[in-house]
């Protein structure tokens, strides 16, 4: 009962009980751990998809209103590639997608986009200070920040 067939089995039993209730004019009530686990797992899986889509759209809108079009597309693409690679890595390592690790892509989006915004702010600040795009990239990526700019 701990597989995808659980959903099919529980839905089949629920349909049988519903048809029995309709035939006999009874109001049917459901209970039991397998039913509750199946319904919650199905609900969480569908909500995870919507939350992932919503988080990508919301964070992309924040980037849209904050930065230039080419940069926004690049960073949104980086985060989406990170989501794809997180699922790919889990599959390559043999992990099954469960309710817990299905949240990984959403966390990548929610953590990745604000980091992209931070890096863009750091780049624009460094570019304003130095006036050189290459030096601004070095400052943005470098571990020591502005230390070598002012030396």
Image (spheres, rainbow, N blue to C red):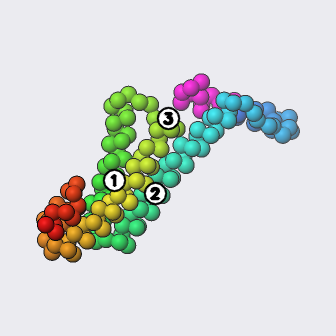
Residue 44's place in the image compared with 9, above or below, is below
Residue 37's place in the image compared with 82, above or below, is above
Q: Residue at x 38, y 40 (%)?
A: 87
Q: Quadrant of residue 39?
A: top right
| Direction from residue 28 to residue 1 in the image, left or right | left
Q: Residue at x 86, y 37 (%)?
A: 26
Q: Earlier in the sequence, mark 3 or mark 2?
A: 2
Residue 118's place in the image compared with 34, above or below, is below
- The answer to whether any part of residue 21 appears in the image is yes
The answer to the question of whether label 1 and label 2 lie on touching residues, with beta carbons closer than 8 A, is: no
Measured as percent of width and height from the top left, residue 74 is found at: 27, 60
Residue, disc 2: 55
Q: Quadrant of residue 28?
A: top right
Taking the magenta stretch, the answer to whether it contains residue 144 is no
Q: Marks 1 and 2, Cα distance to the nearest angstrom?
A: 11 Å
Q: Residue at x 31, y 71 (%)?
A: 67
Is residue 13 or residue 106 the one in the foreground?
A: 106
Which numbered dot is residue 118? none
């Amino acid at each position: 009962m701990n597989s995808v067939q659980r959903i099919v089995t529980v839905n089949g039993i629920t349909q049988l009980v519903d048809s029995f209730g309709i035939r006999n004019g009874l109001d049917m009530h459901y209970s039991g751990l397998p039913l509750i686990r199946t319904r919650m797992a199905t609900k969480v899986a569908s909500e995870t998809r919507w939350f992932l889509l919503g988080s990508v759209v919301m964070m992309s809108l924040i980037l849209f209103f904050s930065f230039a079009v080419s940069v926004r597309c690049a960073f949104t693409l980086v985060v989406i590639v990170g989501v794809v690679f997180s699922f790919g890595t889990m599959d390559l390592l043999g992990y099954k997608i469960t309710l817990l690790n299905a949240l990984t892509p959403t966390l990548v989006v929610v953590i990745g986009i604000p980091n992209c915004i931070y890096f863009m702010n750091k780049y624009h600040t460094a570019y304003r200070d130095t006036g050189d795009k290459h030096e601004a990239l070095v400052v943005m990526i470098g571990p020591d920040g502005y230390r070598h700019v002012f030396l």
